[in-house]
Amino acid sequence: MVSTKVAAAVGGIVVLAAAGGAAALFFTGGDLSFEQPIVESVQTEFGTVSEESTGIETEVVVTNPNNQSFPGAASLNYEIYMNSVRVSEGSEGGIGLAPGRNVVNFTAQLDNTKIPAWWVTHVNNDERTVVSTQARVGVAGLGASLPPQNRSIETDLLTAFASDNSSTVSIADQDIMTVSDQRASWGTANAEETPIAFSVDLANVHNRSVRLDGTEYRIVMNNVTVGEGRTNDSIVLQPDESDTFTANAALDTPRMEQWWVTHLRDEQSTRLRVEVFGLVRDDGELKRVPLNVFDRRIRFETDFLGDEPTRITELPAEDGVAPEFGEPEVQSTSSDWGAVTDETTEIVTDVTVDNPNEGEFNDLLSLRVNQTTEVNDVLFAQNTSTVESLPAGEGTFTISALANNDAVPRWWSRHINNGERSTVTTTATGTADIAVTTLPVSLPDRQNTQTTDVIGQIETEEPQRVTTESGEHVLTITEVDAEWGVSDPQSAPLIVTTEIRNENTFSSVTIEGIDYVVNLNSVTVADNSSENSHTIAPGATRRVSYVIYLDNQKMDEWWPTHIRNDEVTRMSSNTTATIQTPEGTERAAFDILGNDTTIETDFLGGSDDGSSGSTDTSSTNALAPPAAAAAEGS
């Protein structure tokens, strides 16, 4: 910026003119003739900077070629413009010139409150400013204007914002997206705000979708926050998809006055920092994601009163570690039964997890758990549970799944056909939802193998007396063998083969048929007759077989009674035979299904430390999986 001050003392008519950029004064008066004083140079620099004003120190060198002094009869009025904004005005009086070289110094005050208005013109003029100093010299009431002293200034902050570097955003050692080709563009500035759009190219390199529902930005110039806020700019990228993402931010125009003071006090140097973070909508609220989608740190230096171009230097990133997301690790699980209805059985599972996340990521974190339980490949229970709030560190959350009781007949029939053996498999998949994307969480699959021995409970070599209602001992069951036929969801055929001795040495005994009833708790699962007739000669021993049909469709009715009774079932049977002897036809207890049995199960198996394993259980009254329980109950 240039200010010029010249003066002359005259005794006649004074005319001010300009020639070749040098200010000249012409004098006439009588026979006197004077050469014109010449303005040799004008130099300006910033002086004292306060919160209200900025001093502009001006030095004007004027040569008076005459031998005569010009007393202080001249005055100078000046105005300084930055583009169309008048930022300073003032006057100086009592100026005189001695013969030869004269140095005139004065200080103009730039009004700092005009800086925001200048900034608007600077941005809207493609970051160009013309600093113009206009002066008028007057002597004895006469005056003329000196030619304006103009200097053009250009900045290029948009280039400073730009970067063609590419970076990869990773979470939990998984690459999520690449960020490249950062750039910016100005909108039309006004007295309230200076719009600026920050654009980046984003590419989803994750195998799941990535989304941003908005942005949060902060623009700092020399520790002055000149812009901050949130935008609704959003983007959704599917795997392998890329697009340009633009955050439409704005600088607070009035804050440029505060920045101006810091810029000059730091010798026209500014450290600029721009950060744009993503926002995601979580529970209806926009929350910040610790993912920086636009990050620039530069220093720019200007020379408003000189001829040096604006210089831009890229600054290194500030120290500090971005928050990392750690995968929650399942420590153990334990399950128990919840609500039981005639149709469903609830499985309630407590999961102990070590969650290493704190702060921003943990505030966004929710965990979805998909869990499927199959018994011998029959779907028993399936459910998806969402944990909205996962505590940091070690904590426990509860999930539940509903088992459909209708599945019981299917897995029970497969249990029988598989040699009373069931494999219970629980497959779990976890998904950590951190709003911006989802990440897989490792959850252990659990598998155990359980066996039952219903056949073993029935088979015996212990003799059993068959006595008629009249008290006559007619037969002895010396051995009982059993095997399953091919079962289906409707029925389970149990083939019982007995070795029977006729205790009557003089007459035959005919077993005309048997009637049988089998109860599991209060549910009758078999109530039928076998009318196969077998005659045993006097004193002879004969092997005979009966098929006992268990109604598998009753097993889903039995199951709730078993769970409600703390997984304890009383299995009872009543088998009677119709026997023909020489004395006539009589009824007799014919116990070929064993004694009453108490069945206790532990289907859920207590707690699990996350490892898979196999457990075989063969016991007269203990079963583990529901299939096994059903088998024993049958």
Image (tube, rainbow, N blue to C red):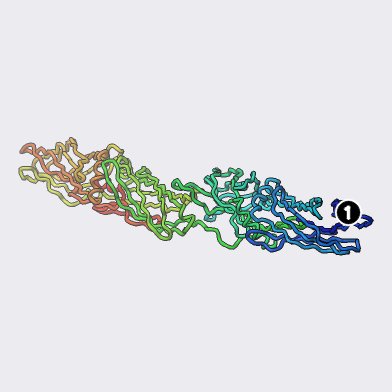
Residue 266 x %, y %: 67, 63
Q: Is residue 536 left or right of residue 134?
A: left
Does any portion of residue 164 appear in the rendered image? Answer: no
Name which residue lies at 34% across and 57% down.
607
User: Label 1 crowding class (10 Å Cα cut-off): few <14, some 14-19, many 20+?
Assistant: some
Q: Amino acid at mark 1?
A: Phe
Q: Looking at the rendering, in which quadrant would you find the C terminus? A: top left
* 42 vs 497, nearest the viewer: 42
Residue 331 against residue 562 in the figure, above or below = below
Residue 261 against residue 192 in the figure, above or below = below
Q: Mark 1 = which residue?
A: 26
Name which residue lies at 5% across and 43% down.
470
Residue 509 x %, y %: 11, 40
The outermost residue toward the right is: 31
* 20 vs 438, nearest the viewer: 20
Q: Is residue 438 left or right of residue 130?
A: left
* 280 vs 468, nearest the viewer: 280
Residue 502 x %, y %: 13, 44
Residue 379 against residue 257 in the figure, above or below = above
